[in-house]
Amino acid sequence: MSFVGTDKSFGNTPGQFQLCSDGRTPKRGRERLVLAVAISLFLLAISAGCSGFFINPSLSSIYINPASATVAVGGKQVQLIAYGKYSDGSQSEISGASVSWSSSNLNVATITPGGLVTGVNTGTATMTASSQGVTATANVSVTLTNITTLVTTTILGSAVQQTAATISGAPLTLQFYAYGNGDPSNDLTEAVTWTSSVTSVATISSGLSGGGNGVASSVAAGTTNITASTTNSSTGQPVQSQPIALTVQ
């Protein structure tokens, strides 16, 4: 803003004020100058005050879809997708360089930077998605292609269906095995989902990416049914073993 001349009148050129003969700004000019300064300060205050409205929401948590999956060794790959939940309540997919993926056991399953899982060997692996220091996990079971039947047993290498087992006392453990398609070479012990019908009698380990699945642990006297289940990777149909009645004496 410039000040020119010595005339007492207000200049016609926009943005210019003329001075009085005594060097003072005319009253009208002073009012306009004060108004201009006030408007500038007001706009600065509005800008500073509104900046909070444009702060990006922070990432609160992550979840993976699907939360668990079954793939076959060398079979069709499975796509995992990470979604973020934010501090403003919104949700959106996290992709590209914004998320990193890792597998807990590369000997069982690998995962690409884009979340595509490939089965390597039968077993279970945990896939982890990470973004901004926040993580989420999904369990992946790797089975053989086209599993149509499951046989469970407590005898290593036996494909003969077993219907009963006993644990003498508590707390004790008993290892169960699962074989696919009646073939002991199709060992799916680490890949299937193990279930105990009465966990107050005995529990059974399942979904451990580091191994040790199929171990029943007695809790109290009674009977519970132990079963194994998986998914046929070709048809998508569930496959379940015969139950073994486990008695804790």
Image (cartoon, helix red, strand yellow):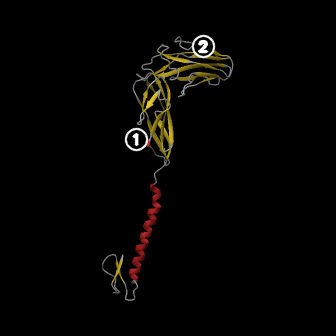
Residue 79 image position (x, y, % from top left): 41, 32
Considering only vertical position in the picture, is 180 above or below 92?
Answer: above
**If you read the primary sequence from the N terminus, does the residue marked by circle 1 or circle 2 appear first?**
1
Which quadrant would the C terminus be assigned to in this image? top right
Q: CA distance from mark 1 to mark 2?
A: 51 Å
Task: Name the residue located 60 percent from the left edge and 13 percent from the top edge.
Answer: 164
Q: Residue at left 47%, top 35%?
A: 102
Q: Amino acid at mark 2?
A: Ala
Mark sitting on residue 164: 2
Q: Is 196 above or below relative to 156?
A: below
The structure residue drawn at horizontal position 44% and vertical position 55%, both measured from the top left corner, is 54
Residue furthest to the top: 160
Q: x%, y% of residue 88?
A: 48, 49
List the residue tagged with mark 1.
96
Q: Can you name the residue that lies furthest to the left here?
A: 13
Dot 1: what SS?
helix
Quadrant assignment, res 214: top right
Residue drawn 41% across and 80% down? 30
Q: Which of the 4 image quadrants contains residue 95?
A: top left
Nearest the camera: 128 or 54? 128
Name the mark nearer the viewer: 1 or 2.
1
Position of the N terminus by quadrant? bottom left
Instruction: Please tell me whether mark 2 sits on a helix, a strand or a loop.
Output: strand
Residues at marks 1 and 2 touching, judged by CB atoms closer than 8 Å: no
Q: Which sits in the foreground, 141 or 31?
A: 141
